[in-house]
Amino acid sequence: MHKPPAHGGFFFFMDTLHNFEQTITKGGWNLKKQFLDAVQAKGGWANCHAHLDKSFYITRASLAESMRDMEVKWRSADEIKATDTQEQVEARISLGLDILIEQGASKTVSFVDGFSRIGTKAIDAARNVQKKYADNILFKTISQPIAGLTNDQTNLAAYEAVTEKVDIVGGLPSIDRPNDKKHLDIIFSLAKNQNKPLHIHTDQENNPHERDTEKVIEFTKKFGYQGRVVLVHAISISAQPKEYRTHIYKELADLGIAVVVCPSAALSMRQLDQYSAPVHNSIANVREMIEAGVLVGLGVDNIADYYLPFVDGDMWVETRMLMEATRFYDFDALVDIATVNGEKIINII
């Protein structure tokens, strides 16, 4: 037998009519529009991670390259990078910025490759674009040690030359395993000597045996770099037991280490079914991080390349992916992740 609502049938009926009017007739259901309006009200999108210097080189013919392992992809585009002219790199970066600006982004960063085969070509291109776009978007550069730092002195020298010219020092410690701690020592030393903040790719594999973040915490303490370090991805933390995750989040919050989440990139990682871990999606647990006081920002990562061939730099799409993958629908917190949190991360000095 149907029972009337506890608060009275008439009043429930009137509330329903009012709700219909607000949601259907006046568009109250359109949370996307409300979200985009809120983003602009808070200063526009802040994109905390990208690789614009090597974007837009995917083709249908080369799409199969995208299904290779990440470690293979690190080298897949070397010929393209080597043969690109500086003007072509400028065009890639400019197109990426145009796409972000068209959405209402007001600030962004981009890693810029530094290795022996390209020298300073990419960073010189990025610096030219910075000047051209200075009135349109805040654009900061980060050095990317894409060929590693511990096995080849020519690559180290090229990375150091690029790092002299960027705004932020960048790291990719996993590329130098098992010498990843030496990699961290190099980038922390360069950052401290040049008085620059650090953005470091960490825990990308969604692998319970990957614990990069522990090592970054260790080096942050060693170099006294509290409040100046940003982790990009931090996916594998989600593959750890809750007690371990809670401990890591507290360390991050206490040390002022921020995290940038790139949802499409995170969800695209290989499924390592040879390992067992707590059930989770392949992405940092944003809800847990926010609740623990960790500063979290948003990034698009790679655009139209071998890593993410169909990613087009759409910040709303990345926000949607974050919401659904983490089941996190706190409207105001999400707006902050996409705007003011990102602004804080990009403006760390």
Image (cartoon, grey):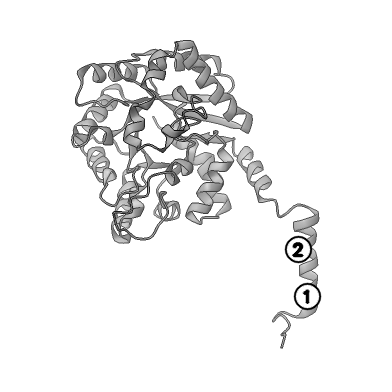
Left or right relative to 189: residue 82: right
The dot on residue 133 is none
Crowding at label 2, few (<14), some or many (≥20) Cα neighbours within 10 Å?
Answer: some
Does 133 appear above or below 66? above
Residue in the image at 34% along x and 30% along y? 74
Tag 2 and tag 1, C-beta contact below 8 Å: no
Left or right of 77? Residue 6 is right
Which residue position is annotated with label 1? Answer: 11
Residue 288 at least partly seen: yes
Location of residue 188 (image quadrant): top left
Pinpoint residue 125: horizontal percent, then vertical percent: 45, 14
- The amino acid sitting under disc 2 is Asn
**x%, y% of residue 211?**
26, 47
- Identify the image quadrant of residue 193: top left
Residue linked to disc 2: 19
The amino acid type, in three-letter code, at marker 1 is Phe
Mark 2 or mark 1: whose residue is earlier in sequence = 1
Asked whether 114 or 252 is in front, the reply is: 114
Above-or-below relation of 110 to 5: above
Q: Nearer the viewer, mark 2 or mark 1?
A: 2
SS for callout 1: helix
Percent of width and height locating residue 203: 32, 43
- Above or below residue 46? Residue 334 is below
Residue that appears at 36% across and 45% down: 234
- The x, y position of residue 210, in whole percent, is 27, 47
Element type where label 2 sits in the image = helix
